[in-house]
């Protein structure tokens, strides 16, 4: 039953990212719910679960939404690995810390992606790319992180009462 719930949550996240958010945001500044979920799962559940979600989310994002395979998969995995290396020093009880961590991970993801585009021979100015494509998304990803934090924290508190 738990696996079915996780699969259904995955489909819901994909639907929101691929269909609902582009309908709401008619600009290039599309929030990245998949990255937000990956960072939040890493914060709450650790490296192993974070890497599993990053690989699945990166493949789904690359195959079904993106143009180039690996453009999301590699940065997601790298962000999870770096975040899990410093996770034991982070205090994740407050929603604003989660929002700040997601914003920093959004910057890191955008920087890694811009380096990948440059390495593949793309004509890209990193500063302009970050300014026009990554910085405007920080607020929206942080807002999504606050919402997801509330959902995950409430779920963890309920499990503590059950056990």
Image: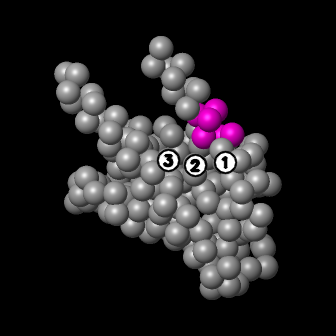
Residue at image mark 3: 37
Which of disc 2 and disc 1 is earlier in sequence? Answer: 1
Magenta stretch in the rendered image: 10-15
Residue at horizontal 34 percent and vertical 63 percent from the top: 96
Quarter of the image where the C terminus is located: top left
1 vs 2, front mark: 1
With respect to residue 139, does 66 lie above or below? Answer: above
Q: Is residue 101 left or right of residue 75?
A: left
Query: Which is nearer the eye, 32 or 49?
Result: 32
Pointer 2: residues within 10 angstroms few (<14), some, or many (20+)? many
Image position, residue 88 (x, y; %): 23, 54
Pointer 3: residues within 10 angstroms few (<14), some, or many (20+)? many
Image position, residue 130 (x, y; %): 62, 78
Image position, residue 101 (x, y; %): 39, 63
Mark 2 and mark 3 in contact (Cβ < 8 Å)?
yes
Could you say whether the residue bearing mark 1 is in a helix, strand or loop? helix
Residue at image mark 1: 17
| Whether residue 3 is visible | yes
Mark 1 and mark 3 in contact (Cβ < 8 Å)?
no
Could you say whether the residue bearing mark 3 is in a helix, strand or loop? helix
Pointer 1: residues within 10 angstroms few (<14), some, or many (20+)? some
Indicate whether residue 58 is drawn in magenta. Answer: no
Could you say whether the residue bearing mark 2 is in a helix, strand or loop? helix
Q: To which quarter of the image does residue 127 belong? A: bottom right
With respect to residue 107, does 124 lie above or below? Answer: below
Q: CA distance from mark 3 to mark 1?
A: 11 Å
Residue at image mark 2: 34
| Whether residue 78 is visible | no
Give the numbered dot on residue 49. Answer: none
Q: Is residue 160 left or right of residue 132?
A: left
Q: To which quarter of the image does residue 158 belong? A: top left
Query: Which is nearer the eye, 77 or 110?
Result: 110
């Amino acid at each position: 039953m738990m696996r079915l719930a996780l699969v259904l949550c995955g489909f819901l996240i994909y639907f929101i990212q691929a269909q609902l958010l582009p309908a709401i945001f008619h600009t290039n500044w599309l929030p990245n719910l998949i990255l937000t979920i990956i960072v939040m799962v890493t914060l709450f559940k650790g490296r192993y679960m974070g890497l599993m979600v990053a690989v699945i989310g990166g493949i789904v994002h690359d195959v079904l939404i993106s143009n180039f395979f690996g453009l999301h998969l590699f940065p997601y995995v790298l962000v999870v690995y770096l975040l899990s290396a410093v996770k034991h020093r982070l205090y994740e009880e407050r929603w604003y810390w989660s929002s700040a961590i997601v914003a920093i991970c959004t910057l890191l993801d955008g920087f890694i992606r811009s380096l990948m585009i440059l390495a593949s021979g793309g004509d890209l100015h990193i500063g302009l790319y970050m300014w026009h494509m990554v910085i405007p998304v920080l607020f929206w990803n942080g807002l999504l992180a606050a919402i997801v934090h509330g959902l995950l924290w409430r779920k963890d508190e309920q499990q503590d009462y059950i056990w």
